[in-house]
Amino acid sequence: MDPIIDSIDRLEAIVGQFQAVARRADKHMVSDILSLRTTYANEIMALFAAVKDDPRLKANPAIAARFQSNFMDARHRISNMQLRWKTADIERDPHGYLKDLMEIEAHSAGLRQWGRQALQGKAA
């Protein structure tokens, strides 16, 4: 069991849930998206805690700093998106929301892949 990889896996699952919910465009879509936003934020905090406590990263401060920087960047990107997409905007244009989400996900997927590689000593 690897707390960081487990957290990365959970983040990936949450993003998948975001995508599924945004595609539904039903009356519960917005409330489910708001709930997932909270879940995502909590998982990012769990990831930061796991990074801070990980012995592999304590032994390599440069990778630890890059790890935190990369995932903080992902958090900022999704936070900025959330600020742009208020409840009424999501209801009015769920496809636009999904499009923005997919752009952020493309970036985040690369960070998750980098994170897995970094923990295996294969990151550039």
Image (cartoon, helix red, strand yellow):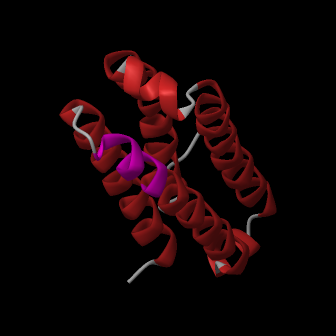
Question: At which x and y percent is residue 73?
Answer: 69, 39
Describe residue 63's horizontal placement relative to residue 95 as left or right: right
Q: Is residue 20 magenta?
A: no
Question: At which x and y percent is residue 120?
Answer: 47, 61
Magenta span: predominant SS is helix
In the image, the segment drawn in magenta is 28-35
- Placement of the N terminus among the 4 image quadrants: bottom left
Residue at 80% over, 63% down: 61
Instruction: Please tell me which residue lies in front, 2 or 63.
Output: 2
Q: Is residue 18 above or below residue 97?
A: below
Question: At which x and y percent is residue 110?
Answer: 46, 35
Residue at 68% over, 74% down: 49
Q: Is residue 112 above or below residue 106?
A: below
Question: At which x and y percent is residue 22?
Answer: 30, 34
Instruction: Please tell me which residue lies in front, 113 or 48.
Output: 48
Describe residue 106's horizontal placement relative to residue 29 as left or right: right
Describe residue 21's horizontal placement relative to residue 122 as left or right: left
Instruction: Please tell me which residue lies in front, 58 or 102.
Output: 102
Residue at 45% over, 57% down: 35
- Placement of the C terminus among the 4 image quadrants: top right
